[in-house]
Image (cartoon, rainbow, N blue to C red):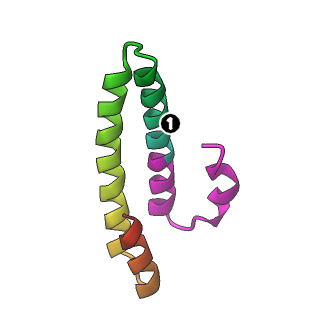
Amino acid sequence: MIVLLPTARLLKSGKDKTNGIVVAITMIIIFTGDILKTLHWPGGQILLIASNISLLISSILMFIDAFSEVDKTKQSIKTLFG
Protein backbone atom coordinates (compact mmCIF):
# COMPACT_ATOMS: atom_id res chain seq x y z
CA MET A 1 0.00 0.00 0.00
CA ILE A 2 2.85 2.40 0.74
CA VAL A 3 4.22 1.87 -2.77
CA LEU A 4 0.87 2.83 -4.29
CA LEU A 5 0.42 6.09 -2.37
CA PRO A 6 2.79 8.30 -4.45
CA THR A 7 1.60 6.82 -7.76
CA ALA A 8 -2.11 6.84 -6.90
CA ARG A 9 -2.42 10.35 -8.34
CA LEU A 10 -1.35 9.02 -11.75
CA LEU A 11 -4.25 6.58 -11.92
CA LYS A 12 -7.11 8.15 -13.84
CA SER A 13 -10.06 5.78 -13.82
CA GLY A 14 -11.77 3.96 -11.01
CA LYS A 15 -10.86 0.63 -12.57
CA ASP A 16 -7.15 1.44 -12.36
CA LYS A 17 -7.47 2.46 -8.72
CA THR A 18 -9.48 -0.66 -7.90
CA ASN A 19 -6.88 -2.85 -9.61
CA GLY A 20 -4.11 -1.16 -7.67
CA ILE A 21 -5.84 -1.67 -4.34
CA VAL A 22 -6.70 -5.32 -5.06
CA VAL A 23 -3.14 -6.07 -6.18
CA ALA A 24 -1.67 -4.37 -3.08
CA ILE A 25 -3.95 -6.37 -0.76
CA THR A 26 -3.09 -9.55 -2.66
CA MET A 27 0.64 -8.91 -2.25
CA ILE A 28 0.20 -8.36 1.49
CA ILE A 29 -1.74 -11.62 1.81
CA ILE A 30 0.86 -13.53 -0.22
CA PHE A 31 3.82 -12.23 1.78
CA THR A 32 2.10 -12.84 5.12
CA GLY A 33 1.04 -16.35 4.08
CA ASP A 34 4.55 -17.18 2.85
CA ILE A 35 6.12 -16.03 6.11
CA LEU A 36 3.61 -17.97 8.22
CA LYS A 37 4.00 -21.07 6.06
CA THR A 38 7.80 -20.89 6.18
CA LEU A 39 7.77 -20.60 9.96
CA HIS A 40 5.20 -23.46 10.18
CA TRP A 41 2.77 -21.31 12.08
CA PRO A 42 -0.97 -21.92 11.88
CA GLY A 43 -2.88 -19.91 9.32
CA GLY A 44 -0.23 -19.97 6.61
CA GLN A 45 -2.08 -22.43 4.38
CA ILE A 46 -5.34 -20.51 4.73
CA LEU A 47 -3.63 -17.26 3.69
CA LEU A 48 -2.02 -18.98 0.70
CA ILE A 49 -5.43 -20.24 -0.43
CA ALA A 50 -6.88 -16.74 0.09
CA SER A 51 -4.02 -15.28 -1.94
CA ASN A 52 -4.79 -17.64 -4.83
CA ILE A 53 -8.40 -16.48 -4.79
CA SER A 54 -7.32 -12.82 -4.70
CA LEU A 55 -4.89 -13.42 -7.58
CA LEU A 56 -7.78 -14.83 -9.60
CA ILE A 57 -9.95 -11.81 -8.78
CA SER A 58 -7.17 -9.33 -9.60
CA SER A 59 -6.36 -11.00 -12.92
CA ILE A 60 -10.05 -10.92 -13.89
CA LEU A 61 -10.18 -7.22 -13.00
CA MET A 62 -7.02 -6.56 -15.04
CA PHE A 63 -8.45 -8.30 -18.10
CA ILE A 64 -11.69 -6.35 -17.81
CA ASP A 65 -9.68 -3.13 -17.56
CA ALA A 66 -7.48 -4.13 -20.51
CA PHE A 67 -10.36 -4.93 -22.83
CA SER A 68 -12.19 -1.71 -21.97
CA GLU A 69 -9.12 0.39 -22.85
CA VAL A 70 -9.52 2.58 -25.94
CA ASP A 71 -5.84 3.01 -26.78
CA LYS A 72 -4.52 -0.14 -28.50
CA THR A 73 -0.98 0.23 -27.13
CA LYS A 74 -2.19 0.47 -23.55
CA GLN A 75 -4.60 -2.40 -24.17
CA SER A 76 -1.84 -4.73 -25.35
CA ILE A 77 0.41 -3.82 -22.40
CA LYS A 78 -2.40 -4.30 -19.89
CA THR A 79 -3.37 -7.61 -21.48
CA LEU A 80 0.24 -8.76 -21.29
CA PHE A 81 0.40 -8.12 -17.53
CA GLY A 82 -3.13 -9.35 -16.84
| Residue at x 29% of width, y 32% of height | 49
Is 50 on the left or on the right of 27, as rendered?
Answer: left
Q: Which residue is mark 1?
A: 28
| Residue at x 43% of width, y 41% of height | 26
Q: Is residue 34 above or below residue 22?
A: above
| Residue at x 29% of width, y 57% of height | 60
Q: Is residue 13 magenta?
A: yes
Q: Position of residue 65 (x, y in %)?
A: 38, 67
Is 9 on the left or on the right of 79, as rendered?
Answer: right
Q: Residues within 10 Å of mark 1 (few under 14, many from 20)?
A: some
Q: Position of residue 41 (x, y in %)?
A: 41, 13
Q: Nearer the viewer, residue 51 or 75?
A: 51
Q: Main secondary structure of the magenta part?
A: helix
Q: Is residue 70 above or below residue 41?
A: below
Q: Which residues are magenta?
A: 1-23
Q: Is residue 68 above or below residue 44?
A: below
Q: Nearer the viewer, residue 37 or 21?
A: 37
Q: Is residue 36 above or below residue 59?
A: above
| Residue at x 49% of width, y 62% of height | 16
Q: Dividing the picture into quarters, in which one does residue 9 lie?
A: bottom right
Q: Dividing the picture into quarters, in which one does residue 46 lie?
A: top left
Q: Position of residue 54 (x, y in %)?
A: 34, 42
